[in-house]
Image (cartoon, rainbow, N blue to C red):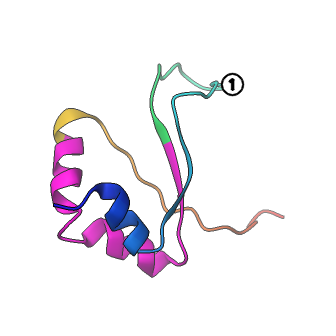
Amino acid sequence: MPTANRVLARHGGKYFARTYGHEQFEGPERGAALRILIEWPSEDAAKAFMQDPEYAPHLEARHAGSDSFHWLIKGQGDLA
């Protein structure tokens, strides 16, 4: 089974940040959590990664051991 990193790279993903090193400025305290930001070449590439059968075991393991939340954030300034 390929690593999640290899599957991500095959879909053109690039890690922007993988860190526990962040500070919460606002809102209810959420506690320590890993934050991961990935840059994708396209929305389709991000969706293909999440649906890749070779990524499925990694996704299943993560869901079994943590609460995970994913957002696809478009690089645009809607409020500008």
Picture quarter with the C terminus: bottom right
Name the residue: 15% across, 55% down.
Answer: 57
Name the residue: 41% across, 53% down.
Answer: 70
State the SS at label 1.
Answer: loop
Q: Nearer the viewer, residue 70 or 55?
A: 55
Quick check: 50 left or right of 1?
right
Name the residue: 60% across, 26% down.
Answer: 27
Query: x and y percent of residue 60 in the render?
Result: 16, 50
When asked about the image quadrant of residue 64, the answer is top left
- Give the total number of marks visible in the rendering: 1
Quick check: 76 left or right of 44?
right
Q: Residues within 10 Å of mark 1 (few under 14, many from 20)?
A: few
Q: Is residue 21 above or below residue 70?
A: above
Picture quarter with the N terminus: bottom left
Q: Main secondary structure of the magenta part?
A: helix
Q: Residue farthest to the right? A: 80
Name the residue: 47% across, 56% down.
Answer: 71
Q: Is residue 63 above or below residue 46?
A: above
The amino acid type, in three-letter code, at marker 1 is Phe
Query: x and y percent of residue 13 in the render?
Result: 48, 67
- Residue span colored magenta: 36-63
Query: x and y percent of residue 33 in the render?
Result: 45, 28
Query: x and y percent of residue 61 in the render?
Result: 17, 44
When asked about the image quadrant of residue 67, the answer is top left
Q: Is residue 66 above or below residue 42?
A: above
Q: Nearer the viewer, residue 15 or 23?
A: 15
Q: Does the magenta-highlighted stretch encompass residue 42?
A: yes
Query: What residue is pinned by disc 1?
Result: 25
Q: Is residue 59 above or below residue 67?
A: below
Q: Does the magenta-highlighted stretch encompass residue 52?
A: yes
Quick check: 18 left or right of 3?
right
